[in-house]
Image: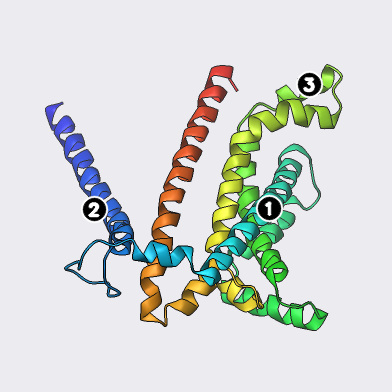
Amino acid sequence: MSSVSSKQGSRFGALGVYAVIYLAFIYIPVMFLPLFSFNDSIFIAFPLKGFTLEWYRQLANSEGMLDALYNSIKLGCVVSVLATLLGTFAAKAVTRYRIPGRGPVITFIMLPLVIPGIIMGIALLVIANMSGVGLSLFTIGLGHLMVSTPFAMLVMVSRLEGFDKNLEEASKDLGDNPWATFRRVTFPLALPGIVASLLLSFTISFDEFILAFFLAGTETTLPVYIWGQLRFPTQLPTVLALGACILMISFVVVTFAEWYRRRGVQLKTNSGV
């Protein structure tokens, strides 16, 4: 008995060491981002030259970077809403109804997940040129929507399959039409999944570079703008300052999302769903 306990203890100890090393490998480099954003030097190297807020001041006055940031936020919001709507409807269809050719339909929707981004970017660029559609945020948004919708659908499928379908049947038996059933029963139970889908789709659109690189016109997104600025060493500290701001905002958003997810799981457990 003691030998089994010792083996389990050594196993958990090894897993703990691995987890610490893994988290350190991922997050320690990220922590250098805000550190160097306060460094009084354009060079990213130790030792630090001093403390300064100059790069944040330059960030506030950088119209090009702020415009690109605004474009990415605007695009991410629109794409996340549309992708979540499409993903929710698709997930409800495949989980609640018998669709002929269900397997091929799901496979077709999931194809953007396995197609290399550079291939999809070139294909969409060719289609845009052949159709005469000018490259703009609209074309970038279409590309991001194609990539985000499968992720949104996967999130919503896992959520809609996670509660009792009899609740919807009971709502219909009590006289509610399909829309009222969705609004009163399905939507509240699926809300944590919807929030997760919105956040995931926004993150995918906000971070995406390859499609935006091929489909951007005169208006660029933030990743494309940052890639162009990395050629100029004097612009790097401003990019680090922006990255530090995004990092802090992302931490707050992810913390809220995790709290909301746990709250949804707790409500689901308490309600017996």
Residue 237, image x and y in percent? 36, 70
Q: Residue at x 18, y 35 (%)?
A: 9
Please state which of residues 244 and 203 is positioned toward the viewer in this rendering: 244
Tell me if mark 3 has few (under 14), some (14-19) or many (20+) residues whose alpha carbon lies within 10 angstroms of its own. Answer: some
Image quadrant occupied by the N terminus: top left
Which label's residue is closer to the chain start, 1 or 2? 2
Please state which of residues 258 and 265 is positioned toward the viewer in this rendering: 258
Q: Residue at x 78, y 53 (%)?
A: 101
| Residue type at the position of mark 3 | Ser
Numbered circle sitting on residue 21? 2
Q: Circle 2 sits in a helix, a strand or a loop, which is it? A: helix
Q: Check disc 1 and report the residue beneath it.
A: 83
Tell me if mark 2 has few (under 14), some (14-19) or many (20+) residues whose alpha carbon lies within 10 angstroms of its own. Answer: few
Residue 263, image x and y in percent? 51, 28
Numbered circle sitting on residue 171? 3
Residue 138, image x and y in percent? 72, 67
Please state which of residues 92 and 211 is positioned toward the viewer in this rendering: 211
Residue 98 in the image: above or below residue 2: below
Q: Residue at x 50, y 24 (%)?
A: 266
Whether residues under marks 3 and 2 lie with C-beta atoms below 8 angstroms apart, the answer is no
Look at discs 1 and 3 and give the one toward the viewer.
1
Mark count: 3
Q: Circle 1 sits in a helix, a strand or a loop, which is it? A: helix
Whole-number angstrom distance, CA of label 3 to CA of label 2: 50 Å
| Residue type at the position of mark 2 | Ile
Q: Which quadrant would residue 136 be assigned to in this image?
A: bottom right
Q: Circle 3 sits in a helix, a strand or a loop, which is it? A: helix
| Residue type at the position of mark 1 | Ala
Whether residues under marks 1 and 2 lie with C-beta atoms below 8 angstroms apart, the answer is no
Whole-number angstrom distance, CA of label 1 to CA of label 3: 27 Å
Residue 139 in the image: above or below residue 25: below
On screen, residue 38 versus residue 219, left or right, reads left
